[in-house]
Amino acid sequence: MALVEDLDVFLADFGVPVSFAGAPDGLLGIQDIEGAHVVGGSTLEGIQVVTAAMKTVMLRTVNVASLNIDDPITVNGIDYQVRDKQEAKPDGVFTVLALGAPGT
């Protein structure tokens, strides 16, 4: 069954401002710090790297389709670079971006 809830209400309650080249005006995302974040896809795709205490932001997938790894992004007024991009399972409505300091 597809998710039919108004996702903008969820983001309005808990979201922080997010901006990047091509981002829609007023874009909101859910900022978090994950205890562990797997970078590199599944083990079938090759080597995985597990990072600890990775800053992340969750955004609607439709809003980040053109965003790529290493692109600059500003989350809640702080500049980052996208380190990884993974669609949240099972429905893919949200994408979680792992964030790193610019230039690292």
Image (cartoon, grey):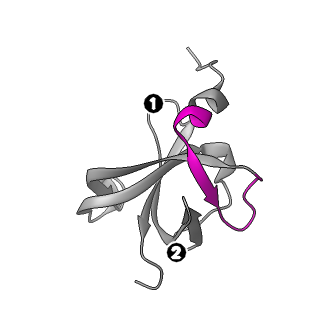
Query: For the view shown, which residue lies furthest in the bottom direction?
Result: 103
Question: Is residue 9 magenta-colored?
Answer: no
Residue displayed at 56% across by 49% down: 16
In the picture, which quadrant includes the C terminus? bottom left
Mark 1 element type: loop
Q: Nearer the viewer, residue 14 or 49?
A: 14
Label 2 crowd bin: few (<14), some (14–19), many (20+), radius 10 Å: some
Q: Amino acid at mark 2?
A: Asp
Q: Is residue 75 above or below residue 31?
A: below
Q: Nearer the viewer, residue 44 or 27?
A: 27
Residue displayed at 56% across by 32% down: 13
* Residue 98 place in picture, x, y as percent: 42, 60
* Residue 14 place in picture, x, y as percent: 51, 37
Question: Is residue 13 magenta-colored?
Answer: yes
Q: Residue 23: name its quadrant.
A: bottom right
Inspect this view and state whether residue 72 appears: yes
Q: What range of the chain is rendered magenta?
A: 11-25
Q: Mark 2 or mark 1, which is nearer the start of the sequence?
A: 2
**Badge 2 is on which residue?**
70
Residue displayed at 61% across by 53% down: 17
